[in-house]
Image (spheres, grey):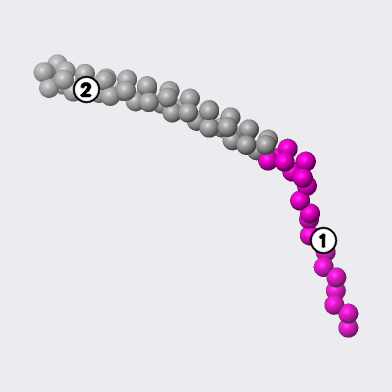
Amino acid sequence: MSTDATTLKENFTSQLANVDTQIVKLEEELAKAKEYKLKLQGGLETLELLNPTEEAPATEEAPAE
């Protein structure tokens, strides 16, 4: 291999290692964000159980003729 090819290979290998490290960190952050989202959804469901919102009637009355 020529010097340029060797340098290029080393550069690509280094970049690949950096990207692998970034992916691991991002996957960890994504897992934490998903867990946080579930906690927030659970909190909203609990609040709804404790304080149910009033629903509007599902059907409208027909106007009298």
Label 1 is placed on what type of residue?
Answer: Pro
* Residue drawn 85% across the image and 70% down it: 61
Residue 3 place in picture, x, y as percent = 11, 18
| Rendered image: mark on residue 48 | none
Q: Image quadrant for the C terminus?
A: bottom right
> Which residue position is annotated with label 2?
11
Instruction: Name the residue at the top extreme.
Output: 1
* Residue drawn 73% across the image and 37% down it: 46
Residue 54 place in picture, x, y as percent = 79, 54
Residue 14 falls in image quadrant: top left
Q: Which residues are magenta?
A: 44-65
Residue 47 place in picture, x, y as percent = 72, 41
In terms of depth relative to the viewer, which is nearer, 25 or 54? Answer: 54
Sequence-earlier tag: 1 or 2: 2
* Secondary structure mainly formed by the magenta segment: loop
In terms of depth relative to the viewer, which is nearer, 52 or 8? Answer: 52
> Which residue position is annotated with label 1?
57
12 w.r.t. 62: above or below: above
8 w.r.t. 38: above or below: above
* Residue drawn 18% across the image and 23% down it: 8
Question: Within the magenta stretch, is there residue 8?
Answer: no
Q: Image quadrant for the N terminus?
A: top left
Would you call the spot at circle 1 few (<14 residues within 10 Å), some (14-19), or many (20 or more)? few
65 w.r.t. 26: above or below: below
Give the CA separation, mark 1 to mark 2: 66 Å
